[in-house]
Image: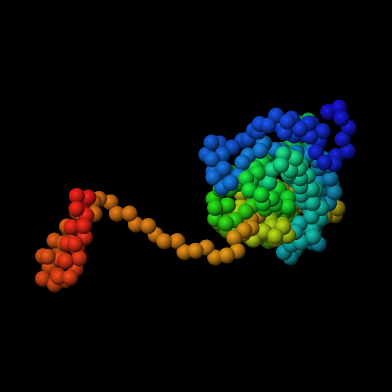
Amino acid sequence: MTVPWSGGGLPPVAAERMAEVRQSGTWTSALSTGEFASVRSVGFEPVGQVMGSAVFQIARSGRYWGYHDCLFSGAGYSFGGYGEAPIALSGRGAPSQALVGVFDQARRTALGRMTQECATLGGDGVVAAQLTMQPFPNAPNCLEFKVIGTAVRARGNVRPKQPFTCHLDGQGFAKLISAGWVPAELLVGMSIGVRHNDYRTQSQLYSWRNNEITGWSNLIHAIRADARQQLQLQGSRKGGDGVIMASGDLRVWEESCIRASNRNSEQRDHVAEATMIGTSIARFRTEAEPPRTLSVMPLGKRGDRLRQRLAAVASSPYGDRDQYRRLLTELQDLGDQG
């Protein structure tokens, strides 16, 4: 890249690519044939493949910056500390909240650049958006956040205030629109929780019986619930009525306890990280849908069915003479078509 860039707006290379796409009059996408047909069936056209990326240095992480503090006052004492250790949860203001904020900023930066590319191409939103996070080559403290999808534009005159983003593929997007819903935004809910291996955890762990490690179960339950709550809060702030889940990820590892190390004691903490990805959706039909009638299409010839009913009425001792005459009239009206 030879053009200086301050970090605001689109990178120069991306801006040049968008200009070339608009001048060429052609578009590219990652949609399959079925996805392309599905998107067009609900009044949208693809306008081009779009992406956004951001490389962030995550140097201030882990024990050295206090983000993984277990907040257990008994850490460092005998047997892991008496009493039940709390769960230091990022969603409840634990030190790990700052680290979650860095990841959230990086994802929003990548999503914002993809959305800006969509707007540059005149798109109304992005479908089949895939969000990934991976280490940057030869830089162990850096992560690349990347999101890529296909920008689409409605054939009508109604335009959203800002482009929507969603993980749904072409068929899923078409089903959503057909059902009276629209995607709003691709969301990421994240939570980090830390729990000290206290006396109760260690006694359960080294027991000779098959039993549950309740402290670790509570840790996993807490971070999953927190990540889901963060996802829900993000969706409600954007006016969404609900969230469609895309994927979820869970990582658990063990680290030396920061508080115990400060007291010259070697004790351990468990750190858990949960990430949930989804798309917020909103209704666009306010009136009630009219009731649908059920169409029944019988197989076979109508004349054969009338003859069977006519024979059943004639052979029955309780047969209705008026019904017999009606069936006979219907059969005669069919003529050669029966």
Instruction: Please state which of residues 179 and 275 is positioned toward the viewer in this rendering.
Output: 179
Instruction: Please state which of residues 121 and 136 is positioned toward the viewer in this rendering.
Output: 121
Horizontal and vertical percent position of residue 130: 65, 42
When asked about the image quadrant of residue 332, the answer is bottom left
Task: Identify the image's colour scheme: rainbow, by chain, secondary structure or one colour.
Answer: rainbow
Residue 110 in view: no
Q: Which quadrant, please, contains the N terminus?
A: top right
User: Viewed as shown, does residue 290 lie left or right of 181?
Assistant: left
- Residue at 68% across, 31% down: 25
User: Viewed as shown, does residue 333 lie left or right of 206?
Assistant: left
User: Viewed as shown, does residue 193 lie left or right of 291?
Assistant: right
When asked about the image quadrant of residue 287, the answer is bottom right
Horizontal and vertical percent position of residue 28: 64, 33
Position above or below: 63 against 306 = above
- Residue at 21% across, 60% down: 330
- Residue at 73% across, 50% down: 162
Horizontal and vertical percent position of residue 184: 67, 53
User: Viewed as shown, does residue 2 lie left or right of 310?
Assistant: right
